[in-house]
Amino acid sequence: MDAPPIPPEAITPPMAPERAVAIASTFDLRALPPDFLANPYPVYAVLRERDPVRAMPDGSWFLTRHADLVAVYRDAATFSSDKHVEFAPKYGPDSPLYEHHTTSLVFNDPPLHTRVRKLIMGALTRRAIADLEPGLVALVDGLLDRIAAQGGGDLIEDFAAAIPVEIIGNLLGVPHDERGPLRGWSLAILGALEPVLTPQRRQEGERAVLDMLDYLRVLVAHRRRHPLDPQRDVLTRLIQGEADGERLTETELLHNCIFLLNAGHETTTNLIGNALVCLHEWPQEKTRLLQRLHDARHQPEQQEAILSAAVDEFLRFESSNQLGNRRALRAAEVGGVRLPEGALVTLCIGATNRDPAVFEHPERLDLSRPNNRHLAFGFGVHQCAGLSLARLEGRIAIGRFLARFPRYTLSAPPVRGGRARFRGFLRAPFVTEA
């Protein structure tokens, strides 16, 4: 199949310097223009240079420097991840979204965070993740077979989004014929985390939480009666496991199952989709990567190292999760700016991963970049618990896709998700042969 080339500006349109300055001068997460959502990095560069600890119109603070984010991540005793104060006015204290987000691992401090993380990490051991690889390879190859039969498809729907849903479904032991709603639930719940909560996002998010709770109650009850190996089945481990002498309550258990789906789904979908679109935008890097993989075709460990470095660079260059949040439990200084007790802080991961103080030529995709200290997985006690699994999924998916379809090309401009927190695509049509 033939397709006209899609120019890079149709994917990530350039932004004039004066436009970036104009957006930065009135920067407000609650009023972001479409051209920022298409390409936020020029605005982030202006903020990082001129106003790296920016006071926002709503009284919060917006951080864009790598060193400042690391300092906040390191000081978990001062900068809390607990969202009870922040989310009560956003969702309402009786909202299903409030109950979910204030119970899940990522939005909590010790002791709940410690207990849940210990249980999850106990089921995501190096051995358990290695055991997932054969099934992951079979899943990816099956998707590639279907794509080959039709000569193309959609990078997101037909490939990137299909992988993490299956992997998380396997981890939780969700029957294959019951996985259909999982992605929709995840997108709706995560969409409600955007800085602007529209009535539609609220309604869809609340419905998704309730529907998923209804489903999980049945799944958990069945697993209690028919447990699996807790060393490999995360749900069995969460049900049976104890940390610090305590088990999870039913509410904690159910909401952290939702968290596992959400944490492992959209970010990994975005990693794979962003990577394959980036290679279209950066054809020289694609050619270089293909050549290096070809040269190492008889050295599996070297190929793995090449792909691992590439995955980390994709994570740096187009971070799946662009924003994080903390609340100052006491007055503190960050980047030379005094923040008051109770200050809400937004951590701009997308900006810090292009900080020239840390990364040479940060606006360039370099798939062999050494010492890549990106913060796509966070840092410190809240570093992503599933980072090894995400890297495995990215490495297998991207590597096997390129081996099968080295000449793939986009057949129409991809459509972005249009969100500030999670950066990825909704659609990216492609053909297997240019």
Image (cartoon, rainbow, N blue to C red):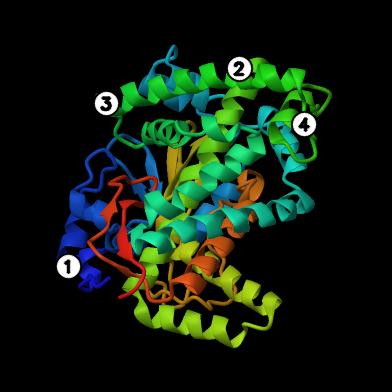
**Residue 228: mark:** 4
Q: CA distance from mark 2 to mark 1?
A: 54 Å
Earlier sequence position, callout 4 versus callout 2: 2
**Residue 249: mark:** none
Residue 149 at x, y percent in the picture = 40, 61
Earlier sequence position, callout 3 versus callout 2: 3
Q: Quadrant of the N terminus?
A: bottom left
**Residue 218: mark:** 2
Q: Amino acid at mark 3?
A: Gln
Write down the residue under mark 1: 16
Outermost residue, front direction?
Answer: 149
Q: Amino acid at mark 1?
A: Ala
Write down the residue under mark 3: 200
Earlier sequence position, callout 3 versus callout 1: 1
Q: CA distance from mark 3 to mark 1?
A: 33 Å
Q: Is residue 198 above or below residue 62?
A: above
Q: Residue at x 55, y 48 (%)?
A: 72
Residue 52 at x, y percent in the picture = 38, 56
Q: Amino acid at mark 2?
A: Val
